[in-house]
Amino acid sequence: MTESIFSADYAERRARVPRGLPLVVAMQGLTDAGGAIAQLEEYLWEHCGPEELVRFNADLLLDYRARRPVITFDEDHFVDYAPEELTLSLLHDELGAPFLLLSGYEPDFRWEQFIDTVLLLVHEFEVSITVWSHAIPMPVPHTRPISTTVSGSRDDLIEARSVWKPTTKLSASASHVLEYRLHSLGEEVAGFALLIPHYLANTEYPDALFAALDGIMAATGLILPTDDVRRLARQFNAQVDTQIAENDESTEMVRTLEQRYDAYMEDQSPRSPLVSEDGSIPTADQLASELERYLAEHRRRGGDDDAPVK
């Protein structure tokens, strides 16, 4: 398969690619609640100036009968045939920092051969970290921030951002298997499963795009413009609020989801050491008294009395 995917000028293009770049994976697979990955792919292609490096052979990887490409009939002839594409491209963020993007359809066939090829490319370009997202419908309200399940090798991201940590069996995607293989090889990889309100799963949900971009930026340090995405999200959510307010059953559903979400998040949040069991916050005098007690105990244990307190 290697010979069939590399174009004649691949060697020239490869020479222009810096080593050590992050790789973003945006393959549209089994589920894409809120159109998160479809939006992400379109956004990156529109805003980040892609230069194609590798085109994968759809005749080897794609089931055309399951995902038929689109063609337009114009009165008496066909035009604008748009075959499915899967490519590796070089892009640049808002500040000009380069990164790689693997985007397009999820392969239907030859997963192991495809993933082996991607692993070779990761090795060849000395990829610093591979980041990918997918989105699943969940009983969560649109009035709360999108939560995520973070997987992979980045313990800092898992600790800071992973809200839901289930143990479950699920239908695998090519991206799942790619992360599994990367993690097994000791490569840096981070996956973000976005938890999308189930009643918005079939819409193009701007908050889903923002959550995907936010995860990419957190994992890679890339800077991607999000002002337009935020504006679209505010407009979309205002329309949803209006529609829900017109239906008592929808209003009650969202209220119930909010209560369950808030109760779950409260259980997941570690209690601050400054908050007492009854939920009250200590006063300044209480904090000063606690500090004096700590310093006195420190001195009794042999601390340096002459050391200045900064």
Image (cartoon, rainbow, N blue to C red):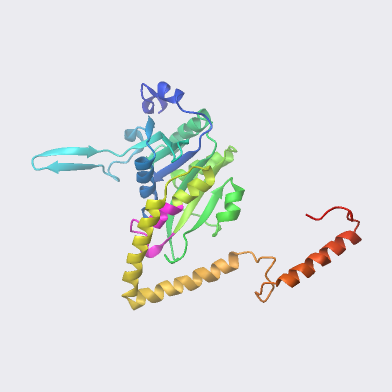
Q: Residue at x 49, y 28 (%)?
A: 18
In this picture, residue 24 sits left or right of residue 162: left
User: Does 198 lie within the magenta span?
Assistant: yes
Quadrant showing the C terminus: bottom right
**Quadrant hosting residue 185:** top right
**Quadrant hosting residue 299:** bottom right
State the residue in front, 20 or 1: 20
Task: List x then y, in percent, for residue 86.
Answer: 36, 37
Q: Residue at x 32, y 76 (%)?
A: 247
Tell me, yes or no, if residue 63 can be seen here: yes
Task: List x then y, in percent, for residue 287.
Answer: 74, 68
Tell me, yes or no, if residue 31 can be seen here: no
Task: List x then y, in percent, for residue 222.
Answer: 49, 42
237 in relation to 210, above or below: below
Which residue extends farthest left? 76
Q: Which residues are magenta?
A: 196-211
State the residue in front, 15 or 139: 15
Which residue extends farthest bottom? 248
Q: Residue at x 70, y 65 (%)?
A: 273
128 in relation to 16, above or below: below
Total marks drawn?
0
In this picture, residue 113 sits left or right of residue 64: right
In this picture, residue 282 sits left or right of residue 147: right
User: Does 201 lie within the magenta span?
Assistant: yes
Q: Residue at x 37, y 56 (%)?
A: 231
58 in relation to 251, above or below: above
Quadrant showing the N terminus: top left
Task: List x then y, in percent, for residue 118.
Answer: 46, 34
